[in-house]
Amino acid sequence: MIITGNYPKLRLRRSRKYNWSRRLVQENNLSYNDFILPIFLTEGKRKKIPIKTMPNVYRYSIDKLSSVIDKALKLGIPMVALFPNTNPKKKDNYGSEALNENNLVCKAIKFIKKNYKNEIGIMCDVALDPYTSHGHDGILKKKEILNDETLDILTKQSILQAKMGCDVIAPSDMMDGRVSLIRNALDQNNLKDVQILSYAVKYASSFYGPFRNAVGSKNLLKGDKKTYQMDFKNNNEALREVSTDIKEGADMIIVKPGMPYLDIIREVKNNFKIPVIAYQVSGEYSLLTNAIKNKIIDKKSIYESLISFKRAGANAIITYFADQIKLS
């Protein structure tokens, strides 16, 4: 760092004295353009079901999506991310429901495209955990998650979602080689314009609990996900994962979780000139909302947490606060 002067001639507080001056030299800003809004889906009609572990977040039936999409559009949020709470009766060891063209995600895509065309982007999660009876992201056999056998289903799931109208395919499974296979399959099916937002850096974290409850996989999960999600003690491994996914055809990458991994966001941004999306995950959201509810911290902490992602180098943020926070 270059030091440009010394006290008393240099007084850094001078630029902080007035509001107009602070705004003038502000290095990072936050707008609704920076947000991706996650939406949880449920079966049935006229349903808006509160998620107990995530205050002010709900599961919506397809016919209730308009209220969420309309608000997102009014705010200027550019994209939503869809996550299903699948009926347990439709779950099996192979996640077969992921390939059903009438599953919740496919029906939601068709509803949004029919009613909103391309006014808002649609991001679809590619993984099997919302559909498997064991709660894992891949095929489970003798306590092992099978990488190559899972890839075939993930590729088919991606093509199905893209044909339904999904704009951004987001593989979150952490299987080796999936980005390359998905990109090739999309191109071969005349879906070249469909983007891939890869969960390149996804740690085996304790911050996912409320999300797993929201999609109905928490109580089903057998064992943990440490054999395919990353060790949170590693940072160089994150760079290897990102490098691999870029070579395989990823258009953007995700770092997940967010706040405990700001250093990883910065390292990735410094090493790769690619759009980086931070995921402020369910555990982060619930910690903040419950602390605010109990008056342990101020509500302004939400904005502070979100601007930290921008400061670290994130281009956008997946956050449950997207349609709740008020930006001036």
Image (cartoon, rainbow, N blue to C red):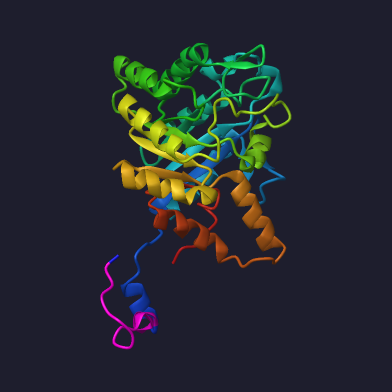
As drawn, is 259 to the left or to the right of 296? left
As drawn, is 70 to the left or to the right of 95? left
Q: Residue furthest bottom?
A: 8
Name which residue lies at 66% across and 39% down.
209
Question: Is residue 76 visible from the viewing direction of this image?
Answer: no
Asked if the magenta segment contains residue 181, the reply would be no
Quarter location, residue 185: top left
Find residue 187 and report its horizontal and vertical position in percent: 30, 19
Name which residue lies at 35% across and 32% down.
243
Whether 141 is drawn above or below 302: the answer is above
Quarter location, residue 178: top left
Q: Which quadrant is the C terminus positioned in? A: bottom left
Whether 207 is drawn above or below 166: the answer is below
Find residue 141 and report its horizontal and vertical position in percent: 63, 11
As drawn, is 114 to the left or to the right of 52? left
Find residue 327 and report its horizontal and vertical position in percent: 46, 63
Find residue 12 and report its horizontal and vertical position in percent: 35, 80
Highlighted range, magenta: 2-16
Name which residue lies at 69% across and 43% down.
51
Asked if the magenta segment contains residue 10, the reply would be yes
Who is closer to the viewer here, 220 or 322? Answer: 220
Count of labels shown?
0
Instruction: Label the magenta part by its dominant secondary structure.
Output: loop
Whether 145 is drawn above or below 317: the answer is above
Q: Which quadrant is the N terminus positioned in? A: bottom left
Question: Is residue 227 visible from the viewing direction of this image?
Answer: yes
